[in-house]
Amino acid sequence: MSSSLLLNVLNETCKFRLEPEERQVAILEELFRAYSEMVKACLDKAMHLGVTSRKRLHEAAYKELRAKYLEYPSHYIYTAITQALAIFKSYRGLFRKRNVISPPRVESLNTILLDDTHLFWFGWGSLKLATHRGHIVIPFKVHEHSKKFLNWQVKGSRLVRRKGNFFLHVTFRKIVEEKKPEGVLGIDVNEKSIDLAVVKPDSVMFIKIDVSEAKYIRDRYFKKRKNIQSKTSGEMKAKLLTKYSGRERSRVSDILHRASKIVASIVAKENVKPVMEKLTNIRERIQYGRKMNRRLHSMPFRKVQSYIAYKSMEQGFKPEHVKARNTSRTCPICGELNKPNGYVFKCRACGFQADRHLVAAWNIAAKLSMWGALPLPPKAAHEAFKAEVERIVIKLLSDNGCLIAQRTYRTCPSSRIC
Ligand SMILES: [Zn+2]
């Protein structure tokens, strides 16, 4: 490993509701109107010329807009160009996929992009904004959740208008120094559990986080949606569907957040570098069948991985991703390739038996080449599987949406999933 300092950059967005005076509301409305026009003009130019380069669009649009909006700070034109390019590029991407979509139209934008140095100055409790009427200072309330960002850097932000209210979406940035790990944490994400192997030079430890609650919620809401689809119609149907899918999403993501928080706390406590599978492999591993599509959606693997990645980086450990080839088939003791068969991994060569997902987690950890010495010497390996598995179950308390994480019981890793 190189000795140079590694840094992880964390970005997070936090929303504040602005409390402008009446006079300031009028200024903001004027600003939104002018900014929409700027973006519209830039977008028209970009589409007309087929330009996706910042530099070229700037050359084509800046002068004219500067002359027209002389009283506005010039950096609004810069960010209008950025926003117009983003709209144009996403339209072009979609158009290439299926060329039936109508061209983008900007009538009244509800978002203004603010760059990080020229258009706004963030204070805890007030926003100083550069406008065509000079600098205005708009107060807002600091909420509890935002206090976490007190010592973070303020990066670009967005001014958002919604139903007559104005919000500031601030992007905060923190640079976290990468810590030196003592070992590796193999993470195997499954439909019903997140399986962990804490692998250190002289020990292995297993933890199973049970997230089957997320799958049950998915199944329950799937049935509910099917019911709604067959028994209601029109506006009622749309309303109910939106209501239930929103509730489902938020409950599932609560569970996954909770689980990834636990993973990150293990990362921090054990001082280990997280290792996960590259996502393309997960799809291969789930056996194809009639229900495949729904099964793939019943566990949003990408989401879980990104939650775990982010929360681990906050702790100073950036995850690695390895190819998952054979992770659920290789015997961690003798290296034999076995046919996967049910929940229990059985090695036909050496007779070794263990929970399939825990074996996969260990194999994932072992794939990280910097710890090339793995698998462990056989003695340590046998010790490891004689040890106990800590099991953490995440459950919803009744229907009020409250989450609890129970550390219920310990089981032997060689036994069937319990
Ligand atoms: Zn074996």
Image: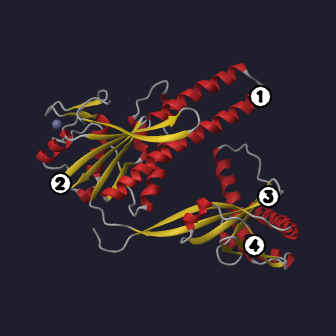
Task: Identify the image quadrant of residue 332.
Answer: top left
Residue 161: tell me if it is visible. yes
Q: Do the residues labelled 2 and 4 touch (CB within 8 Å)?
A: no
Give the image location of residue 106, x and y in percent: 80, 57
Q: Name the residue under label 1.
A: 236
Give the image location of residue 173, x and y in percent: 54, 68
Q: In which quarter of the image is ligand 1?
A: top left
Q: Name the residue under label 2.
A: 202
* Label 2 beta carbon less than 8 Å to ligand 1: no
Q: Which amino acid does label 4 sit on?
A: Tyr
Q: Say which residue appears at 31% left-offset and 59% top-offset.
A: 271
Give the image location of residue 235, x and y in percent: 79, 30
Q: Which callout, 4 or 3, points to the residue nearer the camera?
A: 3
Q: Say which residue appears at 43% left-offset and 44% top-offset.
A: 280
Q: What residue type is labelled 1?
A: Met
Which mark is first along the chain, 3 or 4? 4
Q: In the figure, is residue 105 to the left or right of 393? A: right
Kind of element beneath mark 1: helix
Q: Which amino acid does label 3 sit on?
A: Asn
Q: In the figure, is residue 45 to the left or right of 377? A: right
Quadrant occupied by the C terminus:
top left
Which mark is first along the chain, 1 or 4? 4
Numbered badge on residue 165: 3
Give the image location of residue 407, x and y in percent: 37, 41
Which mark is first along the chain, 3 or 1? 3
